[in-house]
Amino acid sequence: MTTISPPLPVPARDRLVPPQPGSVLWGWLGPLIVTVFGGVLRFVNLGRPHEVMFDETYYAKEALSLLRFGVETKSVEKPDPALLAGGDGVFRTCARVAECGDYVVHPPLGKWMIALGEWMWGVNPFGWRFMAAVAGTLSVLILARTARRMTRSTLLGCLAGFLLAVDGMHMVMSRAALLDIFLSFWLVAAFACLVTDRDHMRARLAEWHARAIPGDFGPHLGWRPWRLLAGLALGAATATKWTGAFFIVGFLVLTLFWDAGARRSIGLRRPYRGSWRRDLPLAVAWMWVVPVVVYLVSYTGWFASERGWGRNWAQATDHGWAFFLFDSIRSLVSYQLQALSFHTGLASGHSYATEPWQWPLQYRPVLLHYSSPQGCGADSCSSAIYAAGTPILWFAGLAAMVAMLSWYTATRDWRAGAVLLGYATGWLPWFYYAIADDRTMYQFYALPMVPFMILALTLVAGLALGKREASPARRSRGAVAVGVFALLVLANFAWLQPILTGDTIPYDGWRARLLYSSWVPPQ
């Protein structure tokens, strides 16, 4: 029988669930102001350049096909001119409808989100980039609020939102109809839900302990809606790109360790067994079963349409509803296995391909657009869009991750551990594919790492500022250091901005902004 210690004194309870100081109004207003700033960067001139950039040629037309047919359909050989003309004539006319299905290797949810923008604003660059800008802007707000909850500081929350707003790669990917910004958005949302669930769970444990209710392993903590929302978001991430599945595993482990740590903090002698018995069953349901359901639901259009590639609709309907259901799942599994084979075997060369160990150093960001227009006041002009991170931010972020490793080793601070796990989950799996499969990869695959890198920088900024009870001189020195760093990041972003948004500048100005010669790969 577990011995229940006396009710926690107020200071101890506050350590279990630290109060959120400061104004509730500013807790929202500050992050919203930073979000508006990030939104301006992402929405102004969103439709420029008026062209189909990089892999927009796949996702813009696949989104349009989902909008019109509910499933991806084969396009004509050169669909880009038709896309830019409004979408008519993009898709082939097939002798049989079942022959129109297009073999695609990414799940449909991210393309459905692109399609929503096309439905609202038309089939044009602004329309197919609109929802990417919405997702990128909302990510700023979610990260700011999450950092505020983690640090119990509105100032640090706003700093996190500001740093995400001025990261070049995050901004560029928020202005392009590619899938990675939607993956990152759903992962940030899932992490935010889990941090919120952690606070709610610890508050319930504190209340239970205060009542000194006897028990061997501690209480059941109810159905935990924030954890359910995290499962829905993780399912949405995986239904956008498969790499979301890595975070399903990582975040489930993380939240179960949080549960066990909370039970240990109230004096239970068997916290891990208590977490296993009380928390694990519902955690698996919410964070494994729910994502699978969300993933399957994202294929509703494929299930419902005879246009779906490999759908085998006619054979299924010939054998009644039971065989139809079995054959539908079997066909989808076969489709997913073929897509998996494509992903693991993707080793086609590309001039902008990089290895994952090169990503934190910004070795070679992808060039999404380049042209040589006139009108810059020089003999030769350039207009370029690089999916490049703000260098000072990324270099400092790498140092901050090292600091998180040291901090977690020394103190076991849950925040450092969470940031390390999120960053590693977004990065380390790619090492396997690089080494085992020699897979083609790009710098922007690192986008899910960015929010955790910024949270690490925010936590380091909190250490630099010092505790609230520190001397005014100590706090002032920390504030100056953090302020100088933020201004340097902003200045670096402003210098890089013309080659992030396709401004027309002199050719020499373009060359001067390239961090390394590797940004222009050998032809």
Image (tube, helix red, strand yellow):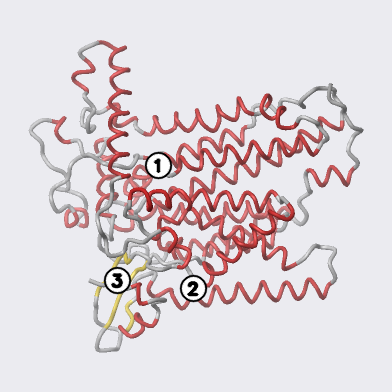
Q: Nearer the viewer, residue 71 or 249?
A: 249
The three-letter amino acid code for the residue at tag 2 is Phe
The three-letter amino acid code for the residue at tag 1 is Trp
Residue 66: give its label. none
Tag nearer the camera, 3 or 1: 3
Q: Earlier in the sequence, mark 3 or mark 1?
A: 1
Residue 242: give its label. 1
Measured Cα–Cα span from mark 2 to mark 3? 23 Å
Contact? badges 2 and 3 (CB < 8 Å)? no
Q: Which secondary structure lies at badge 2?
A: helix
The three-letter amino acid code for the residue at tag 3 is Pro
Residue 493: give its label. 2
Q: Earlier in the sequence, mark 2 or mark 3?
A: 2
* Residue at the extreme left: 95
Q: Position of residue 508 (x, y in %)?
A: 33, 85
Q: Nearer the viewer, residue 454 or 305?
A: 454
- Left or right of 465? Residue 430 is left
Residue linked to disc 3:
521
Relative to 129, is 265 above or below?
above
